[in-house]
Amino acid sequence: MNNTVISVENLTKRYDLGVIGTGTLSRDLNRWWARVRNQPDPYTRIGQRDRFEQIGQSILALDNVSFTVQQGEALGIIGRNGAGKSTLLKILSRVTAPTSGVVKIKGRIGSLLEVGTGFHPELTGRENVFLNGAILGMRKDEVQRKFDEIVDFSGVEKFIDTPVKRYSSGMYVRLAFAVAAHLDPEILVVDEVLAVGDAEFQKKCLGKMGDVAGEGRTVLFVSHNMTAIQNLCRHAIWLTEGEINKSGNSAEVVNDYLSKQFEELEPFVDFSERSGGEKFDEHIFENVSLQNKYGLTNEFFTGDTLILEASLNLDPERINLANFGFDIKDKSEKIVLASNTRQYYSSLPVNKKGRYLLRFSITDLCLNQGYYTISLFIGNEIRDFEIIQDAIKFIVKWKPRADLREPLHSWGPLALPITWEWNSNNQ
Ligand SMILES: Nc1ncnc2c1ncn2[C@@H]1O[C@H](COP(=O)(O)OP(=O)(O)OP(=O)(O)O)[C@@H](O)[C@H]1O
Ligand SMILES: [Mg+2]
């Protein structure tokens, strides 16, 4: 029997580039102003071609992609920003149409795409649950039967009759996930849900997706969290610039992907032109850089000073006392260190609208050799305003020294000084 539920053949998606909106009006104006003055596009990332040169041209977001998914399979889709992951899910969920190629799907799809699709901002949580049920072809009484379970899972009970535009990004995603996972889809499509929400909710989502897969339903999961991909998915596809770079066993695909990523470290990362996949309306972080005592670098020795500098765009009308935080994860995505300004009892005052420079340093970087990533967030007491997962990466190397041998790679990420004592009791 043929158990193929999704079949994708030679799928291509081409976006024609006019001047694409940057996401905010002020940025669009800056871009327009630069263009008028014949200056380069201020929001082009380093290493990217100037977008102005591309006007009238097009981007191949997906380039001749073919694959099949079997009933009950959990398939992970990975790749760098802009690789085409969300575009693929949007085509499968029929949010957007392909330029060419054939997509065949057997079964009802429940999708959790980027925040903004699927939910209507003016409607309440309750109304959105019913709206989504109707889109999935369910009757009102069928949705009604699932309703309590959905609300219970989402934990937004108190706000279920509030329009979802008033929800924090975390609440929004909680409800959207609960809807997508509980309305009995035969195929569950999830884009990056784990980037928001606390660790407990992330675990709950992964558990629920595991249950859905275990019930013989099919799951497609896009994430930058490689541990989650490996835990949930037996198979994975790695997209590079719209093409399938590698597919197969998820542990192997993830391993190749991670090795490749650390070959291309940049000590300065500009966020001003981020492609899709963001869960936040705000674009607060503009760029981030790493330095040691001598200047920009991604390479540190154990014991060095690490300085992180971020440029942020803030408006006191939206956020007047900010809390900035970060975490450092090792290659297996475990947090080895995290902190925020409130831990030091200092919220950051925002008095004027404009650009702020934030800087922190860690003296004596007590990490063993290996690869690390830093994620950044900014919020206030009530909610997160922006989280940038894996904002910047660095590598730690061991500098040979006479008094201490090099630790083994298997000894974990921490390099703390240890004092040894030894006495004989045999006098
Ligand atoms: N509506 C659009 N108009 C023009 N270009 C688009 C549009 N949506 C996506 N793109 C472009 O298509 C490419 C693929 O984008 P896509 O959002 O699918 O990437 P992604 O892999 O999901 O990235 P991320 O990890 O950042 O979410 C990018 O170059 C992006 O800029
Ligand atoms: Mg995306």
Image: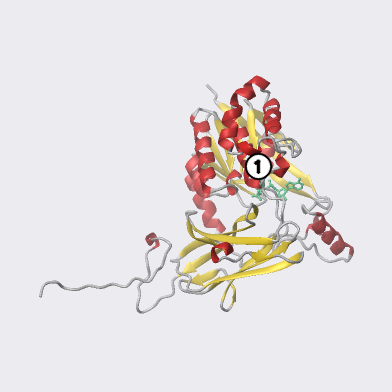
The residue sitting at 68% across, 30% down in the picture is 132
Residue at x-position 63% and y-position 43%: 171
Measuring 54% from the left and 40% from the top, which residue is drawn there? 205
Which percent across, then down, holds residue 361?
A: 56, 71
From this view, report whether residue 395 is shown above or below residue 276.
Answer: below
Q: Quadrant of residue 222?
A: top right
What residue do we see at 50% from left, 36% from top? 210
Q: How many marks?
A: 1
Q: In the rendered image, which quarter contains the C terminus?
A: bottom left
x, y percent for residue 215: 50, 28
Say which of 338 and 328 sits in front: 338
Q: In the rendered image, which residue does mark 1 sit on?
A: 172
- Residue 243 can be seen, yes or no: no
Question: As rendered, which of 292 and 417 lies closer to the eye?
Answer: 417
Residue 227, image x, y percentages: 49, 48
Asked if residue 224 shows in the view, the reply is: yes
The disc labelled 1 sits on which kind of residue? Answer: Tyr
Callout 1 environment at 10 Å: few (<14), some (14 to 19), or many (20+)?
many
In the image, residue 336 lies at what x, y percent? Answer: 47, 60
Looking at the rendering, which quadrant does residue 412 occupy? bottom left
Query: In the displayed structure, does residue 425 sit left or right of residue 147?
Result: left
Does 251 sit left or right of 181 as displayed?
left
Question: Which corner quadrant of the image does residue 417 belong to?
Answer: bottom left
Left/right placement of residue 28 relative to residue 395 reads: right
